[in-house]
Amino acid sequence: MTSRRFAADRAADRAADRVAGRDMPIKADARGEARETAGDRSHDRDPGPAARPSHALSLPSGDRAALAGLILGGVLIGCSPIFVRLSEVGAASTAFWRLALALLPLLLLSARSTTRLAAGSAARPGQAARAGLSARPGRTHPADLAGRLTVSLPGLILGAELVAWHVSLQLTSVANSTLLVNMAPVFVVLISWGLYRRVPGQLFFLALAVTVAGVVVLKGGPAALGGGSLLGDGVALFAALLYAVYILLLGRARQHYATPVIMIWSTSAAALSVLPFALLTEPALFPVTLAGWAVLCALSWISQASGQSLIAWALAFLPATFSSLTLLLQPVVAALLAWAVLDEALSPMQALGGLIVLAGIWIARKAQF
């Protein structure tokens, strides 16, 4: 009975590692039990989105939940421009409170996840891994400097991206800045191609071109561009590059740590990096009314804590190239909400641009699924 229980425990531990993407060889014990290597079962092991060629993805049905989470996260983040418009404080202060106030629900989520992980690991080791939580304590909380950098660096990049975007808004036209900062998917593809040798298929390049064209039309077409400066446009492009790096680093961190852990560390780092900029450039850091605090809480809890957490969770299952392209849904959501909530006119060109963006995302989905 002891030998059989030992073999069962070893098999359960290996199942958890395989689901979490850590399929390592298991050496045989003295009785020859659990004799199996990663190479023996490579035909039934999914190496994960980071190792699969982006042009030859065949996502299982379970990963379609990640697609739904990614889309919902994009929709929630698409609400953020409405909250920023309604905020009583400036853009930089709003960005700080967006990050700082998100720590409360993220800490609650982390505490709940840790409790579930402790209970689930004792009963069924594989269940925690399937939920995106590692059964290994070191994976739950970073134990060394390298681990802390892994979960904090995405937040530092996100904070720098927010600052760069706000600076670009002061140097160039709003149309130019908003359009150029949405070029992040182009940089994600270029970085993945240059550094990781992941070459998307021709259908994905078509989807990228269609979606970017849709964003251009949504923002008013080529005629709306102009009136900016070369420096401001360059800063906006730099912000797009930073957001692309953020998405790639977030996906890498998600291969090793649970979503609540990444979100707490990265959000804290982002808030600390934005705070000095807000103090230096904004006349007021705090809103003066309860309504102002309510707007900031809604922005923080809906767009940041919920939206970014869903995106971080989905990046463990979906490629960064596809995810970044799908997130171009955000300007479409923002335009619709501005029409519905702020009574801003929705022109036929904007409606056409939104449809083109949706068509591009649909093509990208066909290319990946």
Image (cartoon, rainbow, N blue to C red):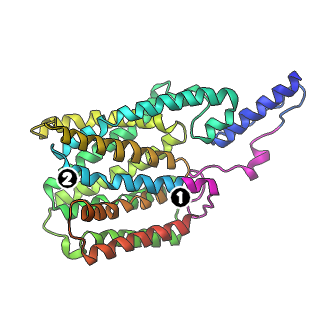
Percent x, y for residue 358? 42, 69
- Residues shaded magenta: 36-65
- Left or right: 311 in relation to 345: right
Membership of 197 in magenta stretch: no
Q: Which residue lies furthest to the top in this view?
A: 2
> Is there any visible trace of residue 147 in the rendered image?
no
* Mark 1: secondary structure: loop
- Left or right: 366 in relation to 180: right
Percent x, y for residue 344? 20, 66
Q: Which residue lies furthest to the front in this view?
A: 290
Q: Closer to the camera, 342 or 275?
A: 342
Percent x, y for residue 352? 33, 76
**38 lies above or below 329:** above
Q: Which amino acid does label 2 sit on?
A: Arg
Q: What residue type is labelled 1?
A: Arg
Could you classify mark 2 by the number of other residues whose Cα lies within 10 Å: few (under 14), some (14-19), or many (20 or more)?
some
Displayed quadrant of residue 102: top left
> Is there any visible trace of residue 149 in the rendered image?
yes
In the image, what residue occupies the spot 60% across and 61% down? 57
Residue 285, numbered label: none
Membership of 42 in magenta stretch: yes
Percent x, y for residue 25? 74, 37
Q: Mark 1 to mark 2: distance in Å?
A: 39 Å
Q: In the rendered view of the protein, which quadrant contains the C terminus?
A: bottom right
Name the magenta segment's main secondary structure: loop
In the image, what residue occupies the spot 77% across and 30% down? 10
Residue at which label 2 appears: 85
Task: Choose mark 1 or mark 2, whichever is in front.
Answer: 2
* Mark 2: secondary structure: helix
Q: Closer to the camera, 332 or 179?
A: 332
Residue 198, numbered label: 1
